[in-house]
Every structure is written in structure tokens, then in C-alpha cells.
Amino acid sequence: MAARRRFPPWRKGGRGRRDDSAPAPADRPQVVAPGWMERAGEMAETGLGTMARRLPALVAQSVRLAWRASPSDTIVTISLNLAAGFFTAFGLLATTGVLTALFSSGPTPDRVRDALPSLVVVAVAAGLRAALQAGAGWAQSRLKPQVERIVEMRLYDLTTAVDLAALDDSDFLDELNRAKGPGLYAAPAVVSGAVDILTGSVGVLAAAGTLGVLHPLLLPLLLLTAVPEGWASVRAARTRYLTMLSLVGVRRRKWILSDLMAEREHAAEIRSFTMRDFLLEEYDTLAAQERDAELAVARRQTVAVVIGDVMKGVSLAAVYSTLGLMLWNGAVPLAVAGTAVLAIRTGQGALANLVFAVNRCYEEGLYFGDYIRFCEDAERRVPAPPEADPAPVPDDFERIVVDDLTFTYPGADRPSLRSVSIEVRRGEVVALVGENGSGKSTLAKMMAGLYRPEGGDVRWDEVSLAAMDPGRLRERISVIAQDYTHWPMTARQNITMARNADEEMVLTASRASGADEVVAELGHGYDTLLDRRFEGGAELSGGQWQRLAVARGFYRDAPLLICDEPTAALDARAEHMLFERIREHADGRTVLLITHRLASVRYADRIYVLEQGKVIEEGDHDALMATGGLYAELYALQASAYRVSPGGA
Ligand SMILES: Nc1ncnc2c1ncn2[C@@H]1O[C@H](COP(=O)(O)OP(=O)(O)OP(=O)(O)O)[C@@H](O)[C@H]1O
């Protein structure tokens, strides 16, 4: 396939394999071309014909986009451009009158006087055309920010709505990267390219119409000059796009590295582990690949442009020779030939603009196509809206049943949960324990309705989560996540999470989590901005952030509280206090607790022990200790570290 030949060396020989001479070592997985490149590469394999076929659809798509952004500016842009084209043709035809008068016989003052009325018409037409073009340009530039806004909003509307599993899929993430980068920027360029196509076409039609009126043979001559330039532009655009595609992986890896080298949070570790040389070398290798690819593009583009220019020169020579012959043979009078030269020059200017616009629209259209495809893919991945009559989400429940649940992350080769069944009754504290990677967080996320099961079900009092409105369901669940976000907002907003702040509830949640002590130290209390990148912003320690994250979980008045490692960063006193609160059933709520601190789950009503995605033991502390299985083993290990007897107290 032709597309393959254009990929860089490491792309040769099939998906993901690299040339031995390529500098990228085997431990650089992001550099491997992702699966979508094959498809996108084929897409970009277009010639003039394909482009001409695709262009109407692209222009129609752009006009629809412009219309959604602003119907009035779209109408003004199109209609003023059409009117400007009319005055271009009108002015050109009036020029014949001027030239006929000037080239006639008789004294010069008389000839100039005879030419005056036509000259006035030419001047008025030029003035009107300029005014209309200025108006059209203004409306066109107004369209840009409006288009940008709607495409950005659509993208983020989708990225925040897609199924969480989509964001675990590396192909989807790559598509997202392309849509969010070049794709997003291409949208206004495509629209303005489409408008420029319209403007250029109107100009060309005006010149062509004039030439057709002057002499029918002049018309095909004008079109002849467009072909070489068009060919060169399309070729250059395709080369650029294919290179961009081949460099997506390299650039992605470069961004990751540049973040690592320039972000404050990694600075200390880079120094402690003397990572500097390693990172710089990695970066340089990738930068060299990018440079080589860019240099190759520059060379291929220049060759295309030079060939195009030579062909254009030849066709221009042919045009003027033909015109000269026609004049010689008396096929056209001198005044008409003079107007024809003007019309050809006008037409060529318009043609050059048209070719540039077509090329730009086509090239940006390739990138914009990435955006469109991403949006279509993302739309398919947005969970279907609940049926017209979704099952009501109860205020509370008697029991939550996880029934035979199986789940595999996208792209993973084995399930993270296999036939898991557990039960949580109202008011209980139920603990999930197990070694790293055993599936605890995955199970908690499924119970929070964040992932959809591959097999099995989660039910609240016999009603499946799948039948409920996910938005309402999540309102009834409070999650203290293991990987919570440090929101760049105030301390209060970090607790209330974009909800109306109830001062009393904020204080209660803060006291319960120990966040009140953190806030007391802050310059502006709950109004302190927690991000050092902003002026006056404060920096918190890991444990202080965790207290806020816990307060966030407590603030939400939900019947089910899921705590995933809520104390990992807490000091001994804060940890003790938090588990005390949880043991008091977190003020009557049902709690699903994940922790490695087994001393803290002793008082749970029930403990489920997971191993490799399966529940292998269940019961309360005493029952599990009596079984002498994994729980007893882990508990004994921890207890011995603290020199506590395995039996308890
Ligand atoms: N987003 C993801 N994409 C693919 N695989 C994942 C993802 N998250 C987790 N996994 C895999 O699923 C398995 C279970 O992970 P999970 O985070 O549920 O374990 P855990 O018991 O909570 O571990 P830990 O105690 O370390 O927090 C692991 O093998 C992990 O590699």
C-alpha cells in the first residue's frame, strides 16, 4: 500500500515494528504507530480527483458549521462576496469600453473624453467591489471566534460525557489528542478556507465570464493555468499531513517528556534520581526523529512547488502566445485583447487565491476530519440516555447486591474482576481488602456506576444500576477516590465540588475529616485558592490534600460512601480519627471501605478478600482469622510489624 512507504523507518514492516537503524529503543512504546494510523494514512492518499470529489462535502460541512456558529454572519459573508464578484465582472466589461474609446482614431483629448463615462463606471464598480469585500472580510473574521467556541464546547461536552472506559482505551486517547490539537485549530481555518473558496470562485467566474463574453476560446486558456498550481498545492498538503500522522506518537512522547522536565512536581525527583541526562537524551532522540521528518517534508514540498511553478510558467506562455496569435489573425480587436489581458490577470489572481483556499480548506479539512471522526466515535461512547422512564434512584436502599460481576479494561488481556458477588446492607461498614492489583478499586468504581459490567450486575434493592439515570445515581453515592484531584479552586470549592455551599455542612465535613485544622492555617481560610500557579495560591502537603478529599466525600449527603484508601497519606492521629468516624458508620451512612491498614477493618461488619479479581474469602474479622487464609496471613504480617498479637488487642 502506498501509504506505508511514506511512514518513517520504524513504521516499516508492519504495525509497531521498527527498523534496526532507527534510534528508538524497544522500551519506548508511545513511539509505535497506533492502529488508526493505517486508516488515516489511506485517507490522506488522495490526488486532485479525490480532492475535487471530497471538496463539495467539505465546503457544505463548513457552511453548516458556520451557520451553527452565526447564521447572520454566514449570510452576510456569502452574499457580500457574491455581490463583489458581480462588480468585478461588471468593472472588467466596462474596461472594454474604456479601451475601445482610447484605441479609436481621432485626437487624444476626444478619445479620453469618450472614455470618461466608461472610466466612471469602472471606478464606481471598483469602489463598490472594495466596500463589499471589506464587509465580507469583516463578517468572515467575526465567524472565527464563534466557530472556535462551538467546536471547543462540543469537544469538551463529549470528553466529559464519554464512558469512563473510553478514556482507558489508548486508540481513543490518540484520537482525542489529534482532535484536541490540530483538529480543533483546523475548524475555523476550514470555515475561512471554505469562504475563501467561495470568494475565489466568484472572482474566477467573473473573470471567466468576461473572457467568455470577449471570446469563447479565451476561457479554457485561463483554466489551463490553474492545473499545475493546484497539483503542487495538493501534493504539498498531503506530504505535510502524512508527516503529521507519522509523528503523532513521537510528539506525544515528547510532550510527556517535556512535562516531566519542566513541571515543578517532578523537579525534585529528577534531581534526586539524577534523571536529567537520561531524559535529555530521550528527548533529543525524539527531537532528532521529528527534525528529520520535517526536513524531508520541506524537501518534498519544495520539489513539488518548483515542478508546479515550471508547469505554470509553460502554461502561461501558451496562454499569451495564443492570445498574440488571435490578435495577429484579427480574431480579436486590440481593445478586446487588452481587456482579455486584464481579465486573465484578474482571473489568475482569483485563481491563485482559489487554489490556495482549496488547498488550505483541503489540508485543514484532513485535520478537521480527525476532529469530526473523534466526535462521532465519542458520541457512540457516550452512555445511552436513560430510557424515557428510567428506574427511580431510591433515596436509600436496604441492600446493594453485586452479582457475578465480570469486567475487563479496554485493551487488557485479562479481566480485572471475575464473577465477583458481594452484598452490602444499609448502615454497614463493608471492607474490601487484598494485595495490590487484586481488583478492589475496580470493584468500587463499578459499584459507583463509573464502569459498565461486562457480565453480571450491581443492584440497589433489585433495581439494576444499568436501569437508573447515571447522573441521579451518582448524586446518591459519595466517593473518596484513591487518585483524587487537587482542584485548582478554593478550599471551600474543593469540599463542596461546584455545589451550593452550605456553611454548616462544610464545617461538619471538615471537622470529621480533620480538614478544619488544614484550613485554619490558610491565609484566607476556606476562600484560599489551592494552587501555587495563581497569585496568593497556597500549597498543601499530601496529607493535607487527603483531608480535604475526605471532607469532599463527607460533604455530599449520600447514603453510600465509598472510601478508597482514604488514609494513605494521613498521619497516625488523623488516620485514627477518620477510622473512628467511619466506625461510627459515618453518621449512619453505608460505607464501602478499601484499605491496606488491616487493623482498621477489624471492626467492619463484613470483609471481602480479593485476589486476582476474585473474592476468595468473606466474613468478619474473627471468622477470617479463624479460617487462617490470606486475610489472616496479611493481618499477622502487619500485626507483627507493630508487635501486636495476631489475636487482636
Ligand atoms: N485504567 C485501567 N486500565 C487497564 N487496566 C487497569 C486499569 N486500572 C486498573 N487496571 C488493572 O486492573 C487490575 C486491578 O486494579 P485495581 O486498581 O482495581 O487494583 P487494587 O486492588 O485497587 O490495587 P491497589 O491495592 O494497588 O490499589 C490491575 O491488574 C490493574 O493493572
Image: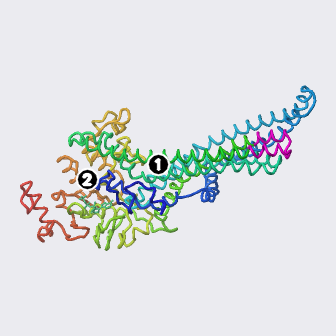
The image shows residue 303, relative to residue 166, as above or below, that is above
Say if mark 2 contacts mark 1, CB within 8 Å.
no
Which percent across, then down, holds residue 369? 53, 55
Which percent across, then down, holds residue 601? 19, 60
Name the secondary structure under disc 1. Answer: helix
Name the secondary structure under disc 2. Answer: loop
The image shows residue 325, relative to residue 451, as above or below, that is above
- Can you see residue 251? yes
Q: Quadrant of ligand 1?
A: bottom left
Amino acid type, residue under disc 2 in the picture: Pro
The Cα–Cα distance between marks 2 and 1, rounded to whole angstroms, is 36 Å
Task: Using residue 160 as the reference point, say whether residue 429 is left or right of it.
Answer: left
Observer-side mark, 2 or 1, equals 1
Assign the magenta stretch its main secondary structure: helix
Q: Quadrant of the C terminus?
A: bottom left
The front one of 140 and 202 is 202
Which percent across, then down, holds residue 291? 40, 44
In the image, residue 117 lies in the stretch drawn in magenta:
no
Task: Using residue 482 as the reference point, say whether residue 628 is left or right of it.
Answer: left
Residue at 23%, 70% (x, y): give it: 615
| Residue bounds of the magenta highlight | 320-343
* Figure coloring: rainbow
Classify mark 2 as within 8 Å of ligand 1 or not, answering yes or no: no
In the image, residue 324 lies in the stretch drawn in magenta:
yes
Question: Residue tagged by mark 1?
Answer: 181
Amino acid type, residue under disc 1 in the picture: Gly
For marks 2 and 1 on the same chain, the one whose residue lies earlier in the sequence? 1
- Can you see residue 608? no
Which percent across, then down, holds residue 14? 39, 63
Image disc number at residue 219: none
Question: Residue tagged by mark 2?
Answer: 566
- Mark 2 is surrounded, within 10 Å at the Cα level, by few (under 14), some (14 to 19) or many (20 or more) other residues, namely many
